[in-house]
Amino acid sequence: MQNRMMVTGAGSGLGREIALRWAREGWQLALSDVNEAGLAETLKMVREAGGDGFTQRCDVRDYSQLTGLAQACEAKLGGIDVVVNNAGVASGGFFDELSLEDWDWQIAINLMGVVKGCKAFLPLVQASHGKIINIASMAALMQAPGMSNYNVAKAGVVALSESLLVELKQQNVGVHVVCPSFFQTNLMDSYRGPTPNMKAQISKLLEASPITAADIADYIYGQVAEGVFMILPHEEGRMAWKIKQQNPQAIYDEMAVLAEKKRKKSKT
């Protein structure tokens, strides 16, 4: 019976909702985050939902903390069946305004955090013939203007997931990548970027979204059960991706118009 899951960024938002969705099926959860108060809250909710587990503070930038978490999973749960690399931070700003530090910070968490999570937990999912679920973003596929460092980090997560999908197939390890669009989340608490206006614009998009993190977690649960590799929880995201596959130029043209609008707004 496969019923042990590890989630990074489980202290809030989508990470918490993923933990709760699987907890309702009675799973054991290894919950990690840098936010310990949020983690304690998630574990309490997990237990109320019918699951159980433990929490461990973990900064995904630090590989030794991830291997330590993997060891704890082995000691406390006897292994892991599903790894969810969800921890992430928001970022924005036009390329000419972003500093190299902004790039390093974004890549270190949103891309290398996922790479390190996969690396640290690979022996455990190989042993259990389990699954890896990496959380990317529609930004990985659509590359909206004014967030190049975020786009690149998330596109890297998709490329990593595609690589693992084919490399791990014969070892019976399933791989999934999730590309949500904007949804109601506290991602903006971690936001970093040169222009405050850009933050306000992104916040507005997040607040306007009718879809919640719980809806997305539920959609992921169903798609993973069906064995879908690329999971696109938003209807408009699925449509945009279809258009881009058939006519990329149409999307580039639209994004160029959006870039112009964003630039005007960030100057006002």
Image (cartoon, rainbow, N blue to C red):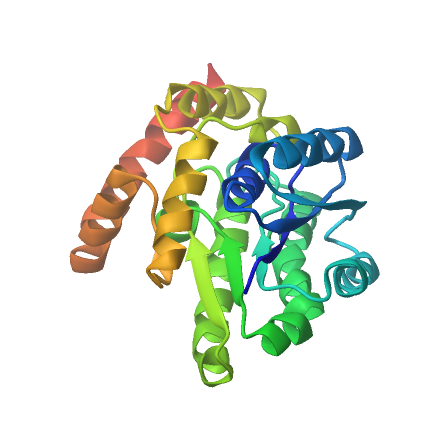
Figure quadrant of residue 50: top right
Furthest toward the bottom, the residue is 170
- Identify whether 208 is placed above or below 240: above
- One can see residue 38 in this view: yes
Left or right side of 158 for 261 = left
Looking at this view, is 240 or 170 the one in front?
170
Q: Position of residue 43 (x, y in %)?
A: 69, 36
Q: Position of residue 215 (x, y in %)?
A: 39, 34
Looking at this view, is 166 or 53 the one in front?
53
- One can see residue 192 in this view: no
- Identify whether 170 is placed above or below 40: below
Looking at this view, is 151 or 254 the one in front?
151
Query: Which residue is rendered at x = 48% and y = 51% of the image?
Result: 136
Left or right side of 105 for 213 = left
Count of marks placed on residues = 0
Q: Position of residue 56 (x, y in %)?
A: 79, 46
Query: Which residue is rendered at x = 76% and y = 65% of the image?
Result: 74
Query: Which residue is rendered at x = 34% and y = 31% of the image?
Result: 260
Figure quadrant of residue 237: top left
- Identify whether 190 is placed above or below 268: below
The quadrant of the image that shows the N terminus is bottom right
Q: Position of residue 109 (x, y in %)?
A: 67, 50
Query: Which residue is rendered at x = 52% and y = 46% of the image?
Result: 22
- Identify whether 209 is placed above or below 143: above
